[in-house]
Structure formats: structure tokens, C-alpha cells
Image (tube, rainbow, N blue to C red):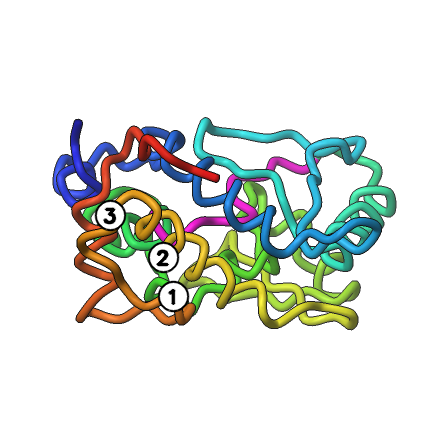
Amino acid sequence: MPTVQQFADARSCSTAGLRPLTIQILEVLLNSINIPDEPSLVRCDDIPGLQIVGGSTIPMLQPAARASLQHVIELRDRELKLVHAYRTIAQQYVLGEWVGRCQGITAARRPGTSDHEGGLAIDINEFSVWKNTLVNNGWVWAGMGDRGHFRFAGQDVDRTVITESVRAFQVLWNRNNPNDLIDEDGIYGEEQTGPALRVSPIGGFPTVL
């Protein structure tokens, strides 16, 4: 089974191959942060007019970001093509390895620092069609250096989701590596979490919850 680093080195330029591992990380995260009647991450693929493009998309956002995105689509009354929303630490790491090496991947923040990992960012196609409406409804455009990227800067967001996203991987790793435990501190570092992530199997671990 290839590791995350081997997958990054192979440069497929799509994180779809990471899906088994990313789904496991997401499952741990949702079990941790989504309490009844007050979820921190919700699905957005049920928004009318939203089209998911690509096999790597995890269609989840924080509730306030989802509500704003739905409002934007209603205002424009046309189809919005969503490339990325929430990302796991594994996806974020691999995209960082591909910056400048894969067409269209022009920027990626360090794992543990991306608004995607906090459920507060989207990457879309046809950015110029949507830019003004998104900006007028709480979203911040990244600029021409990452022109399809928008960050939600509105009210009622949970800033702990990004930390819990890192912790979800740490918890998953520890459940499957009792003899090689890492700190469950929600911080991506190169002493423990980074090396563990790089050797993790893209097909996932035997134990999730």
C-alpha cells in the first residue's frame, strides 16, 4: 500500500487517490466535533445549483459558510462548480508538495494552517463570474495568485475546527500505532505529526473508531 509521501512523489495531481485515508480522518473529526443539533461541519452538496467537480472534493463546510454559499448561488441563479471545500491534513500536505509541479496548483498553505482544514474555504471554477457576489456576502478572494480560492470571513464560525482536524489524524494514527504514539495536540509539526503523516497508508488504517 503506497504511503502519503509515495503518493505525493508519484504526482498524480489529484488527491482523489487519498480518499480512503481522508474519509477515515474525517470520520474521526466529525465524531469529535459534531454534537447533536450544533454541528461544526455540515454537508453542502445538497445546495441547489452546486455541482461537485472532481473525485477529491469533500463537500463539507461550517454552517455559516454553507448558508452564505447557498445564498450566493440563489442570488446568481446559476450553477457553481465546486472543486474543493473541506480538506484533511493529508490532502493539504500533498497539495503543498505539488505546488509548481502540477498545472493549476499555484498555492497551498502548510498543513494545519489552511482555511480549507477549518471548513471555511472553497476553490471554484469560473471565479470571475462569482467573485463580486461572494465578496459581497462574507467571502475574501485570494487574488490572481490563487484565483479560484475564497475564504469565508463572516460571523458565527468555529476557529477550533482547524486544530481538531489535525488532532483527528493524530488520534487515528495513535489508535493504529500503539508503539509509536504522537502527541494529540492538534499541532502539525515535523518532529511527530509530519513524519507520521508521510508514512501513513493512502488506503487507510485497520482501525478508525
Residue at mark 1 to residue at mark 2: CA–CA distance: 5 Å
Pointers 1 and 2 in contact (C-beta within 8 Å) = yes
Residue 112 vs residue 171, the one in the foreground: 171
- State the image quarter where residue 46 is shown: top right
- State the image quarter where residue 182 is shown: bottom left
Extreme-front residue of the structure:
179
Mark 2 surroundings within 10 Å by alpha-carbon count, few (fewer than 14), some (14 through 19), many (20 or more):
many
The mark that comes first in sequence, 1 or 2, is 2
In this view, 144 is above or below 44: below
The amino acid at mark 1 is Glu
Residue that badge 1 annotates: 184
Mark 1 surroundings within 10 Å by alpha-carbon count, few (fewer than 14), some (14 through 19), many (20 or more):
some
Residue 190 is inside the magenta segment: no
Residue at 65%, 50% in the rendered image = 61
Q: In x, y percent, where is residue 23?
A: 46, 36
Residue at 80%, 45% in the rendered image = 70
Specify the segment rendered in magenta: 80-90
Residue at mark 3 to residue at mark 1: CA–CA distance: 13 Å
Residue that badge 3 annotates: 177
SS for dot 1? loop
Q: In x, y percent, where is residue 4?
A: 22, 42
Residue that badge 2 annotates: 170
The answer to whether residue 47 is left or right of residue 23 is: right
